[in-house]
Amino acid sequence: MEPELLGEYLPVFARAAWLTLWVGLTGIVCAVVVGLACAVVQHFRVPFARQLVSAYIELSRNTPLVVQLFFLYFGLPKLGIVLSSATCAIVGLAFLGGSYMAEAIRSGLEAVDDGQSQSALALGLSRGLTLRHVVLPQAVALAMPAFTANIIFLIKETSVVSIVALPDLMYVAKDLIGTDYNTREALTLLVAFYLVILLPISLGAGKLEKKVRYAAFGS
Amino acid sequence: MSTTLKRLAIGAVTSALLLGGLAGCGGNPSSNSSNSFNTLEQIQAAGTVKIGVFFDKAPFGSQDSTGTFVGYDIVYGERIGQDLGVEVEWVPVEAASRVAFLETGKVDIILANFTVTAERAEKVDFLNPYLKVSLGVVSPESGVITDISQLSGKDVIVVKGTTAETYLEANNPEIKLTKFEQYTEATSALLDGRGAAWVTDNTEALAWSLQNPGFTTGITTLGPQDTIAGAVTKGNTTLLKWLNDELVTLGTENFFHKDFDLTLKPVYGDAVSPDDLVVEGGKV
């Protein structure tokens, strides 16, 4: 291992880390929006839309992100739609993450015992107040571990976006290995940078889970 | 100890161990102790030689519809196997992973259109050459590139770990490179209009533009003339010597001219003369 090489590669990796984080977080925000919409449709059993959402969730959860990205980047141009690398990556993450988020949120909503809302209604709370003060806090607490696991999962999934020529961490590592052949230095920085991104998120998630747990029934 | 602290400690210890392990591997960069390879005797005793070839770079190395490897490099590799008296196991490789496959002993020989460069020669042992090459620039007929200056500020497609990438980064930093890992990805991107041009070996450029209407090789020679050679793991001298002797034998038969007629002529037609590409006996 040559330390001066690590110093030389550091700025390249730092730039790539920003891109990884930016693409990852934008993708996650979009995934949460998609997931929320799908969970609401499923929870309130909206006719027709419900079947559509189920089909989407099965399609999204049972195809790998690499395949989805290939379709977006190399497939759509054959239909005349040319999306940029970054757009493909974000759309891909939102498409994949949306279904995972939907399932996490839905499981939270469904896990709240029916007796809870019935009791609240019996005590005279309106439907809106019941949802806001009784059902949602408990649902959020129950869904949080799955939700944060999804966030970490999606950031890790960004490691395949280099196939659509987006210069993320994986892309620069492979590029440096392919041109300079300093495999050890490049791989060391690759591992280090993923840890720098993911460890704080993982720790923050643990704290957040604890914070919302107060609302969980029986704990 | 709180859970958060515990997790932080575990994370820090694990990463320190991991990084320490990687650093340990490089303790002595001058030694080749990390390279493992099979000597000539070991290959002959095992009865199999593993040859790393391209699987998507017709007409040099590609797979046909039945999955059989075909092309100029394959014909050469088959002959090596025959003369060694062993079976050939084909190992598909990508451009950027050719050095790593040799360093880790995953293949015995690389015959994947491997251009000889000084940086690569520090990591692997090249045989004497069997082809000569420079770079070529493929562009759509609607916007033919005939001079490299036309590419300034435009997106240009390259494959990672190729001489095209290194050459353009060193000599034309004003060009924006879009890099792919596989040739099929690079050519798909070119077909989809994701770049003004694709820069690659001129052998490959000419072959591809002849096969794909609407595209042309506007620049047929760019950069210095290089040679293409097989390679073995650094330090595998017994195999290296045998293969270089083999090249001399093949030269007396004009083997590579026959190989050209068999695999390259159907593609190039009369656009390329065999003497422009082929090197016989390992001597340019």
Image: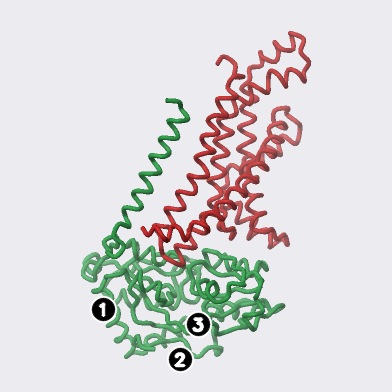
Chain colours: A red, B green
Q: Which residue is mark 1?
A: B241
* Quarter the N terminus of chain A occupies: bottom left
- The CA distance from mark 1 to mark 2 is 26 Å
Q: For mark 1, does the 10 Å Cα neighbourhood hold few (<14), some (14 to 19), or many (20 or more) residues?
A: few
Q: Is residue B18 left or right of residue A168?
A: left
Element class at badge 2: helix
**Foreground mark, 3 or 1?**
3
Mark 2 is on which residue type? Asp
Q: Which residue is mark 3?
A: B134
Element class at badge 1: helix
Horizontal and vertical percent position of residue A140: 63, 26
Image: A15 above or below B203: above
Q: Do discs 3 and 2 share a chain?
A: yes
Give the chain of mark 3.
B
Which comes sooner in the sequence, label 1 or label 2? 1
* Quarter the C terminus of chain A occupies: top right
User: Residue at 76% of width from left, 13% of height from top?
Assistant: A125
Mark 3 is on which residue type? Ser
Kindly identify which numbered label has been placed on residue B275. 2
Residue A95 appears in the rendering = no
